[in-house]
Image (spheres, rainbow, N blue to C red):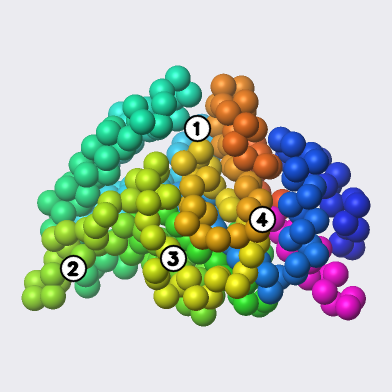
Amino acid sequence: MLAPSETQLLDIIQKIAIVSNVEVTAKKIDKILLDGLNNLHIICDFDATMTRYYKNKDRKERNPGSHLILSSSSRLTDETKLLLEKYYPIEINPKLTKEQKIPYMVEWWNKAHELLIKQQINKDDFATMVDETPVEMRSGLKELIDKCKEKKVPFLIFSAGIGNVIEQVLIRKNLYHQENMHIVSNQMKFNLETGICDDFTEPTIHIFNKSEIAVKHSPYHTTIENRRNVILLGDSIGDLHMADGIEHDVCLTIGFLNHDVDNLLKSYLENFDVVVIDDGPMDVVNIILQEIDISEKKI
């Protein structure tokens, strides 16, 4: 397949996604294309962004998030799903403000972590437990990750899920590349003497406080400090804050609106540059990276 010219690129994107402000988005894409891959890095959410929202869309069967991946193990009692059913409608309720939602999100994450700690999970059993639960990755993700590895584009996974689980899922799928990939997430802490998970790292990362988690002082920051452009991918309005605290010239935001399109589309278009609906693939970012790659090969 031939790569599109720069003038065709936005037209192609508009055929597979919804662009909120064509003029603003076009300027962002033009700068990203002009500056090239050496000036770009990716920031990506995990649950329902790198993974699909639905396991079976026709039956409305949810793909498990990283908390549920672990708690679905046959070795554990599964109460995490009940928390999801209670708190997720609050997270996506467009009638509530962020400030009104935050106490519920903190309560949700604390209860989820308390449940997992009670299960007495042993580090030696952890990988096997995660591997029990099938997880569907978003179409086009492998192409994105492989391209970023090949071109040494830093790839930050910024998740309110469980980092240990995310890493194991990616290892199992042959998608984890330490050389250009970094995970910022909640981490299970295993007791050095017993091997049992008895705590989680602090501060707890939930969907609405990603802006408060310092990437700037992590080792990862040295790999991106001279890269002035970022493509941010997420499925929640809260994900837009993943790039806060990181200096950049351009941040192109791509939102995955996986469900309730009629009710949520207006809000997503007011916040994201590009919106991919109905649990769609990673095609938008892959097309942009392909265009940059081919343009650079012509030089």
In the picture provided, is 93 more to the left or to the right than 100? right
Residue 80 disc label: none
* Location of residue 255 by image quarter: top right
Q: Which residue is mark 1?
A: 60
Q: Main secondary structure of the magenta part?
A: helix
Image spot of residue 28 (x, y percent): 74, 52
Measured as percent of width and height from the top left, residue 54 is found at 51, 41
- What is the crowding at mark 3: few (fewer than 14 residues within 10 Å), some, or many (at least 20)? some
For residue 190, the mark is 2
Image: magenta residue range: 285-299
SS state under label 2: strand
Check contact, mark 1 vs mark 4: CB within 8 A: no
**214 relative to 124 in the view: left or right:** right
Front-most of residues 271 and 290: 271
Quote the CA–CA distance across marks 4 and 2. 39 Å
Q: Tell me the distance, in whole angstroms, between the alpha carbons under discs 3 and 2.
A: 26 Å
> Which of labels 3 and 1 is toward the front?
3
Can you give x and y, in whole percent of width and height, for residue 245 in the image?
47, 57
Mark 1–mark 2 distance (CA, rounded to whole Å): 35 Å
Which of 38/132 is in front? Answer: 38
**Which amino acid type corresponds to the residue marked 2 in the rendered image?**
Phe
Compute the Cα span from label 3 to label 1: 39 Å
Residue at 51% of width from left, 38% of height from top?
A: 237
Q: Image height check: is 93 above or below 208? A: above
Q: CA distance from mark 3 to mark 4?
A: 17 Å
Q: Which residue is mark 4?
A: 250
**Residue type at tag 3:** Lys
- Residue 248 appears in view: yes
Residue drawn at the location 53% of the way across and 75% of the way down: 223
